[in-house]
Image (cartoon, helix red, strand yellow):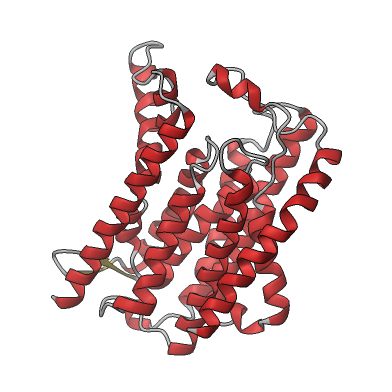
Amino acid sequence: MNAVLTFFVCGFLISLCAGYPYIRLLKRIQSAGQPIRGDGPKQHLSKSGTSTMGGVLILLPVILSLLFAPSLWSGANLGVLLVFIGYAAIGAIDDLKKVMKRNAYGGMTPRQKLISQIGIAFIGWMVVHFNMPESQQFTVYLPLIDVHLNLWYAYIPFALFVIVGASNAVNLTDGLDGLVTVPVVITLSFFLLLILWIQPSFMVKLPSDQLNNLANLIVLIIGSCLGFLYFNLFPAKIFMGDVGSLALGGLLGVLSIVLKVEIFLAIAGLVFVIETVSVMIQVVYFRRTGGKRFFKMAPLHHHFEHVGWSEIQVVKLFWAIAAFSAYIALGMAALGHRL
């Protein structure tokens, strides 16, 4: 428990202390800040000039900790870190292209981004796969009915879908000041409680030292996220950018695979599911009706803004949904543990 507290404090303090110098540096480098979408809510035009790539403040404590705590990148943790850092690199390239072109749509093409995400997800999954008990390598636990479904090799595309899907879902959710950070912290806290408190029987049967290292990594990133949140709350001094949202989403996906709680991710991370589904509904409806819109704007958080909600009201609503859904997932995990 002392180690967990140490990693949390380190993550929080490194992120917090690096914040102001990093923001000053970005203001010199990114003279125009993050490009603002012209078709977005009009009140967002006031955000023009705000620097992006704030996700580096979440990545930095992890990189520094790896230098002083090599145990963090051993075993299954190595696969988790490969996805987290690899997706951060994809996001950094995307952010830099947008800033350089001064165009919100000037980043990597969807095809380039997707191929990169799948490639890194596959490498990360392979590392995780070979560090996992053979009996659990291809299984998915279905809560409530208490069934371990063996997908055999069909598990590989399923795992890639979970990692890539979670990454893009978190990326879609990152559209308002502070909106995405708290749901990510809540979902990570759900994983942490599974390891340290509930320890359900359906969870992965990794050696205790590997689970402890995984808990340390999770709490390090939770601390880093909270340090970053200080600068990202409304009105944000810095935006997370794809460097943060793609990395955190990929992290959630690969953690659910490591712990064998893939279905629970969709429950605990309900906010991300809702945002993604709202985009899918908007696209399908737009195409089927010849240009009509189901929502005033997607993802869903922008719809609420268009109907008159303030940014703070929308963020609070989504935070509440995130807390509620994680509580439900925790209850289901505790119930499954007793079945």
Asked if 210 appears above or below 282 in the picture, the reply is below
Asked if 57 appears above or below 205 in the picture, the reply is above
Residue, far right = 28
> Percent from the top left, x then y, of residue 103?
71, 26
Query: Is residue 222 or residue 276 the one in the foreground?
Result: 222
Query: Is residue 333 or residue 246 the one in the foreground?
Result: 333
Q: Is residue 321 visible?
A: yes
Q: State which quarter of the image contains the C terminus.
A: bottom left
Residue 306 shown left or right of residue 24 in the figure: left
* Residue at horizontal 32 percent and vertical 81 percent from the top: 135
Residue 324 shown left or right of residue 312 in the figure: left
> Percent from the top left, x then y, of residue 330?
27, 64
Q: Is residue 299 visible?
A: no
Image mark count: 0
Q: Splitting the image into 4 quarters, where does residue 155 fall?
A: bottom left
* Residue at horizontal 45 percent and vertical 26 percent from the top: 310
> Percent from the top left, x then y, of residue 173?
47, 40
Asked if 152 appears above or below 28 in the picture, the reply is below
Asked if 337 appears above or below 176 in the picture, the reply is below
* Residue at horizontal 60 percent and vertical 61 percent from the top: 224
